[in-house]
Image (spheres, coloured by chain):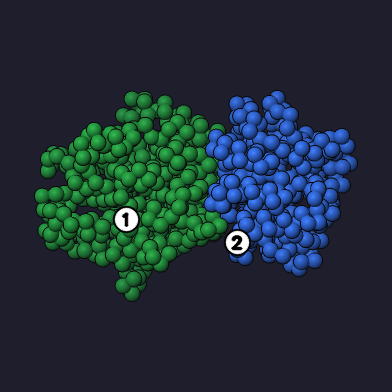
Chain colours: A green, B blue
């Protein structure tokens, strides 16, 4: 496609969201009145600080020396050969401090909290990666930290629960609703409404009311900016395709956003197909949902005909969410990104495969992207390339995989 | 004139305050809601706020969250809630009924379809907790067309500019949230409410009800002098839930009679 055609086909991605947080019909601010003032304050502070060289320098410095960026772009040659199609590159977010991409965003938001003078941070977490990343930055900045986590996720991610406690955070068990990520987010919002004066809510994905989807995207876009430069240096030119898993969508938008205007780059967001999208037991709102309002934004949702949010299922706690960040909903509507799904079994097989073939153990979330990349690569030529966002490492999931294997690990 | 406007002008002439109980439709059964509504009116309620069950009631404290969960366990939907209001209207054509809930069920039904069915059922107002004025213009216009009042929240954090913006879109009454927190919170501060009311009055002549944290005659009569009505939610929902038989649940509405007595004698 020519640049001109691209310009005609898509709007200018840099103009989104609009000043009220809308991406097409998606996004916006659907919260109770009490929080509006706090969101205005946050928007104002972010606008000011993102243009402030001192703030940017501190953020860049933390990413380099605390997180360990840039993360490598690794050409998985052995795996690519075995797959027998396109060359597959892995963007190694798993090598970040705390083991996932989540920390890019928590560093950014915790810095905002610090500059805004907030003493207490709260966070919601599903897999526990965002909770761990939040507890980590809170420890470092000497802030009080409480993490809301569904009772069901506390059970599946025991290791991360203990990590958060060691880091000095308090993990609050959420027993309402389905006892997973969406309920943890409800509870975090309730806490924020109550303690809005002294508390900063660090949302862990590119969802929630404006300005969260925008600022999470901006903080995570370091992934795509680095990958774009690294690919040009290592392979020359641009990749043919990008693949990333989509829970709320933060690692995916972080990789995709800096490439949106590159017309030759196809993009695939991989949702959790659970037991199969056709069974209804999945977490794939972009594949099988309809637009609605939840957690402060309009977006594709898994909901029933009465407008109730449905229970989701995924083997991976980090993807087990009935909504998705609003920018993804818009990118689906305008046709810029393809959204697909991978089932539990396929993700588990990919987890084992990458571990055996490359000695890299992916998080179960990332394993969805790995599984789809393998399928996609087979349809492509060896002179073509794919970048897969390896959003996190699999250490936290060993317990889950072992129990599927019937092995108990104490 | 809508039932709400009529009621408030009548109350003003009498020098009385509106008493507004809140219950969730279908909590804990669909059968009990209709008799509860009539009983609340018999005990002195002026307006009924009926909660529409939602899977993710983000603004509610634990008591009302559980009420939503009980109602959803027996599949009480927005459609079912409208049927209950319809049944109520067969025997009561005067008491205003306001639906209070979240945006998604209304959006799923479709704004126009909702307006049509709500009008037919005899609903007087709608309060969607998570639909602030900046996102509400489309729904507001449709409700106005249908003659349904659109009720909005004002919070302790609302700036003068927002109070003005909200008042411009609102009709029926404004709902002043007394505190920073969820429903059922225990830290009501009457002085703060009074200051907040002064701020609101500077921008609007609409009646204002105060809710969140009003649980008995004492708290209601402390707040009532400063506003046009008081909303009683969690305390009522909790005492109904604590009563095991239907007869006992109806008897729990006595709380409303107590509060009526208290606010009528200030
Ligand atoms: C390693 C990893 N990848 C992906 C995700 C999904 O989140 P998102 O879609 O926001 O990247 C999570 C969430 O916990 C995660 O831990």
The percent position of residue A98, horizontal first and vertical second, equals 32, 49
Q: Which of the pair B114/B17 is nearer the observer?
A: B114
Q: Is residue A130 left or right of residue B208?
A: left
Residue A363 in view (yes/no) = no
The percent position of residue A13, horizontal first and vertical second, equals 33, 35
Q: Residue at x 53, y 58 (%)?
A: A305
Q: CA distance from mark 2 to mark 1?
A: 31 Å
What is the crowding at mark 1: few (fewer than 14 residues within 10 Å), some, or many (at least 20)? some
Secondary structure state at the residue bearing disc 1: strand
The percent position of residue A136, horizontal first and vertical second, equals 38, 46
What is the crowding at mark 2: few (fewer than 14 residues within 10 Å), some, or many (at least 20)? many
Under 8 Å from ligand 1: the CB of mark 2? no
- Whether residues under marks 2 and 1 lie with C-beta atoms below 8 angstroms apart, the answer is no
- From this view, report whether residue A302 is shown above or below residue A213: below
- From this view, report whether residue B91 is shown above or below residue B16: below
- From this view, report whether residue A350 is shown above or below residue A115: below
Q: Which residue is mark 1?
A: A340
Q: Is residue A221 left or right of residue A380?
A: right
Q: Which mark is residue A363?
A: none
Secondary structure state at the residue bearing disc 2: helix
The label nearer to you, 2 versus 1, is 1
Q: Which residue is mark 2?
A: B72
Q: Residue at x 14, y 52 (%)?
A: A87
* Image quadrant in which the C terminus of chain A is located: bottom left
Q: Residue at x 72, y 60 (%)?
A: B33
Q: Residue at x 12, y 43 (%)?
A: A235
């Amino acid at each position: 496609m020519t640049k001109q055609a691209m310009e005609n086909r898509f709007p200018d991605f840099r103009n989104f969201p609009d000043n009220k947080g809308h991406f097409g019909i998606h996004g916006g601010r659907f919260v109770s009145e009490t929080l509006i003032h706090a969101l205005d304050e946050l928007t104002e502070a972010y606008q000011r600080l993102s243009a402030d060289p001192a703030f940017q320098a501190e953020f860049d410095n933390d990413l380099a020396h605390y997180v360990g960026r840039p993360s490598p772009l690794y050409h998985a040659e052995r795996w690519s050969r075995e797959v027998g199609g396109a060359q597959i590159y892995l963007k190694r977010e798993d090598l970040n401090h705390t083991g996932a991409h989540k920390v890019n965003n928590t560093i950014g938001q915790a810095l905002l909290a610090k500059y805004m003078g907030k003493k207490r941070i709260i966070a919601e977490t599903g897999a526990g990666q965002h909770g761990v990343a939040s507890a980590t930055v809170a420890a470092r900045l000497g802030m009080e930290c409480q993490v809301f986590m569904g009772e069901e996720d506390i059970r599946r991610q025991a290791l991360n629960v203990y990590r958060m406690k060691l880091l000095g955070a308090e993990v609050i068990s959420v027993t309402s609703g389905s006892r997973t990520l969406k309920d943890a987010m409800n509870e975090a919002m309730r806490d924020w409404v109550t303690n809005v004066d002294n508390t900063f809510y660090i949302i862990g994905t590119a969802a929630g009311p404006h300005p969260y989807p925008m600022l999470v995207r901006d903080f995570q876009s370091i992934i795509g900016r680095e990958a774009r430069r690294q690919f040009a240096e290592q392979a020359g030119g641009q990749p043919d395709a990008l693949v990333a898993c989509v829970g709320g969508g933060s690692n995916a938008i972080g990789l995709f956003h800096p490439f949106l205007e590159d017309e030759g780059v196809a993009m695939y967001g991989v949702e959790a197909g659970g037991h199969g999208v056709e069974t209804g037991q999945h977490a794939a709102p972009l594949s099988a949902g309809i637009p609605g309002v939840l957690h402060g934004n309009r977006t594709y949702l898994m909901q029933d005909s009465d407008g109730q949010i449905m229970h989701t299922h995924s083997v991976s706690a980090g993807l087990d969410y009935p909504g998705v960040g609003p920018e993804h909903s818009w990118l689906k509507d305008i046709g810029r990104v393809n959204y697909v799904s991978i089932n539990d079994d396929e993700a588990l097989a990919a987890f084992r495969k990458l571990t055996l073939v490359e000695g890299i153990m992916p998080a179960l979330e990332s394993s969805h992207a790995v599984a789809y990349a393998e399928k996609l690569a087979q349809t492509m030529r060896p002179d073509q390339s794919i970048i897969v966002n390896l959003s996190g490492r699999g250490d936290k999931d060993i317990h889950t995989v072992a129990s599927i294997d019937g092995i108990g690990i104490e | 004139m809508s039932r709400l406007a009529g009621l408030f002008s009548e109350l003003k002439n009498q020098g009385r305050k509106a008493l507004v109980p809140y219950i969730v439709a279908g909590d804990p059964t669909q059968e009990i809601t209709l008799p509860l509504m009539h009983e609340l009116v018999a005990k002195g309620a002026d307006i009924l706020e009926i909660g529409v069950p939602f899977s993710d009631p983000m603004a509610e404290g634990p008591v009302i969250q559980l009420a939503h969960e009980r109602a959803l366990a027996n599949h009480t939907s927005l459609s079912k809630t409208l049927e209950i209001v319809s049944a109520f209207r067969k025997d009561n054509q005067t008491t205003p009924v306001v639906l209070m809930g979240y945006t998604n069920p209304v959006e799923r039904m479709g704004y126009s379809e909702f307006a049509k069915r709500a009008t037919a059922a005899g609903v007087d107002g709608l309060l969607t907790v998570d639909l602030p004025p900046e996102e509400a213009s489309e729904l507001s216009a449709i409700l106005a067309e249908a003659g349904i009042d659109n009720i909005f929240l004002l919070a302790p954090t609302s700036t003068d500019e927002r109070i003005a913006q909200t008042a411009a879109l609102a009709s029926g009454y404004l709902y002043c949230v007394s505190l920073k927190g969820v429903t059922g919170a225990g830290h009501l501060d009457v002085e703060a409410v009074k200051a907040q009311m002064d701020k609101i009055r500077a921008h609007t002549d609409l009646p204002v009800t105060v809710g969140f944290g009003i649980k008995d005659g004492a708290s209601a009569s402390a707040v009532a002098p400063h506003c046009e009505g008081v909303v009683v939610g969690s305390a009522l929902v909790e005492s109904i839930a604590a009563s095991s038989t239907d007869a006992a649940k109806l008897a729990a509405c006595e709380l409303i009679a107590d509060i009526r007595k208290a606010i009528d004698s200030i």
